[in-house]
């Protein structure tokens, strides 16, 4: 963690550096500095609410292993999403891994190279072979027209990613999966609260994984969940996440420890109370970005997606150097110089990482859309506490770079 970009940027922040001595204040005019702006900041509920839950945990001394708060959060989330079965996990990547195991998938899995590495790492940790498929240029999600070309006799599943909460073409993916008898596990890490045709996205495919990491719109410090269609799958996952334990003397499978603890669950219960209001705030911030950046040639804003209610938790723009006059990286660095820490999610492509670049499907010629989007994308800061005038400052910085 000491080497993470987050920590580097905190250390670099002039606001956190030692302040000037009182004598220098009198003589030196300090240049105007702004507090750093990060791509996101975790939502923190009021501390007294958490303290109340901590008191409850202290009094009953159940810290983990399917405790009362854990059970309550599973029920409340299933109710919030209106889904039949939901299991909680200690983080999103373990949630993906347990879901893959519970679905008994072996062989090749078709997935997107344009995601956070955990999407593909989960396959590798389960001994599966990732096969990268290109994405489509409007939603940055798996291109269904290309999925069938990736299918071989070893293909067993598809792991599409609702990247930034932009829904995959769930209908076409369903048809392909049916035709070829494939399982579908959605990486819905970014899709909390996203609705498609008026309903949650999480009921699509065989299962969907959510991440509740600190950086997500709904966080449990670290955490995650899997929504699935069958009771059997939920029961398998619940055993797998707890070392394979069925009862004191029955250990039915080689499980692992992927359980959410009671403090995480308490955080989740608090976050759930106002997550809808946060989504509305993000929607307003997105609208301001759209207004302020909409006129500028060379900046491509997120597309309007019909029948979709987004959660607006990412604001990805594409910078086209030829039209804008500066590269994506120039914009990224110029913002950074102003203490604005936008992020290149997701660059590099997963298929370009040392662990994967030797795969036959990893060649850039096989992934032309992903290649271009990954070289142009920049996620601008967005989180519920971000001030509107910070958005204005970010947009001024960007548009001031246009040549
Ligand atoms: N699938 C997808 C599509 C995903 O995006 C992710 C995770 C996963 C699977 C796996 O889920 P988990 O196993 O993580 O539950 C962050 C998150 O760590 C990661 O969860 C997330 N995706 C990814 C998109 O973003 P980094 O390496 O960019 O995080 P970091 O530490 O640089 O944080 C970004 C910014 O957030 C910082 O500049 C400041 C702010 N921040 C972050 C943390 C952790 C804070 O203000 N406070 C904090 O505590 O990966």
Image: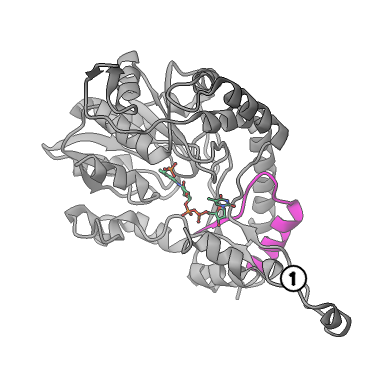
Identify which residue, 192 or 300, lies in the foreground: 192
Residue on which the image places disc 1: 33
Please say if 79 is above or below 337.
above
Q: Is residue 252 visible?
A: yes
User: Where residue 348 sits: x, y (%)?
Assistant: 38, 61
Residue 358 in picture, x, y percent from top left:
19, 59
Q: Position of residue 326 (x, y in %)?
A: 53, 73
User: Residue at 38% across / 47% down in the picture?
Assistant: 136
In front here: 170 or 190?
A: 190
The answer to whether residue 240 is left or right of residue 90 is left
Q: How many marks?
A: 1
Say which residue appears at 45% left-offset and 34% top-offset: 224
Relative to residue 148, is residue 226 depicted above or below? Answer: above
Viewer-closest of 204 and 128: 128
x, y percentage for residue 179? 21, 27
Determine the image quadrant of residue 19: bottom right
Q: Residue at x 35, y 22 (%)?
A: 238
391 inside magenta stretch: yes
Could you say which is closer to the camera, residue 103 or residue 240?
Answer: 240
On the picture, is 234 further left or further right than 254? right
| In this rendering, position of residue 334 left or right of residue 364 | right
**Figure colour scheme:** one colour
Residue extending farthest right? 26
In the structure shown, which secondary structural element does the residue marked by tag 1 occupy? loop
Q: Is residue 212 magenta?
A: no
Q: Residue at x 27, y 47 (%)?
A: 133
Q: Which residues are magenta?
A: 378-398
Which residue is situated farthest in the left direction here? Answer: 153
Can you say whether 192 is above or below 2 in the image? above
Q: Residues within 10 Å of mark 1 (few under 14, many from 20)?
A: few
Q: Is residue 324 visible?
A: no
């Amino acid at each position: 963690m000491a080497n993470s970009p987050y920590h580097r940027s905190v250390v670099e922040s002039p606001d956190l550096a030692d302040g000037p001595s009182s004598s220098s204040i009198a003589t030196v005019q300090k240049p105007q500095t702004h507090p750093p702006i990060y791509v996101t900041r975790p939502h923190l509920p009021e501390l007294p609410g958490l303290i109340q839950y901590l008191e409850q945990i202290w009094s009953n001394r159940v810290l983990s292993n399917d405790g009362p708060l854990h059970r309550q959060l599973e029920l409340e989330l299933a109710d919030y999403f209106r889904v039949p079965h939901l299991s909680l996990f200690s983080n999103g990547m373990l949630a993906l891994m347990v879901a893959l195991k519970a679905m008994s998938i072996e062989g090749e899995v078709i997935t997107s190279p344009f995601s956070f590495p955990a999407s593909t790492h989960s396959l590798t940790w389960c001994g599966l072979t990732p096969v990268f498929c290109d994405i489509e240029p409007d939603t940055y999600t798996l291109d269904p027209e290309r999925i069938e070309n990736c299918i071989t006799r070893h293909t067993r599943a598809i792991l599409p990613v609702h990247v930034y909460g932009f829904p995959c073409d769930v209908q076409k993916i369903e048809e392909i999966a049916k035709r070829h008898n494939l399982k579908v596990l959605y990486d819905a890490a970014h899709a909390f609260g996203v609705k498609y045709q008026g309903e949650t996205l999480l009921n699509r495919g065989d299962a969907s994984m959510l991440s509740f990491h600190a950086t997500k719109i709904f966080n449990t410090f670290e955490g995650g969940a899997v929504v699935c269609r069958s009771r059997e799958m939920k029961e398998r996952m619940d055993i797998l996440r707890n070392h394979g334990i069925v009862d004191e003397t029955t250990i039915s499978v080689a499980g692992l420890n992927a359980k959410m603890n009671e403090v995480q669950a308490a955080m989740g219960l608090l976050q759930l109370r106002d997550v809808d209001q946060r989504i509305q705030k993000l929607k307003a911030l997105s609208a301001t970005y759209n207004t302020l950046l909409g006129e500028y040639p060379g900046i491509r804003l997120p597309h309007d997606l019909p029948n979709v209610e987004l959660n607006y938790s990412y604001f990805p723009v594409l910078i086209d150097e030829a039209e804008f006059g500066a590269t994506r990286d120039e914009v990224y660095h110029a913002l950074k110089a102003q203490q604005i820490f936008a992020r290149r999610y997701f660059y590099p492509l997963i298929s370009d990482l040392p662990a994967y670049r030797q795969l036959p499907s990893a060649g850039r010629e096989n992934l032309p859309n992903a290649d271009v989007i990954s070289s142009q994308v920049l996620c601008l800061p967005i989180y519920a506490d971000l001030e509107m005038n910070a958005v204005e400052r970010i947009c001024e910085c960007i548009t001031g770079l246009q040549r």
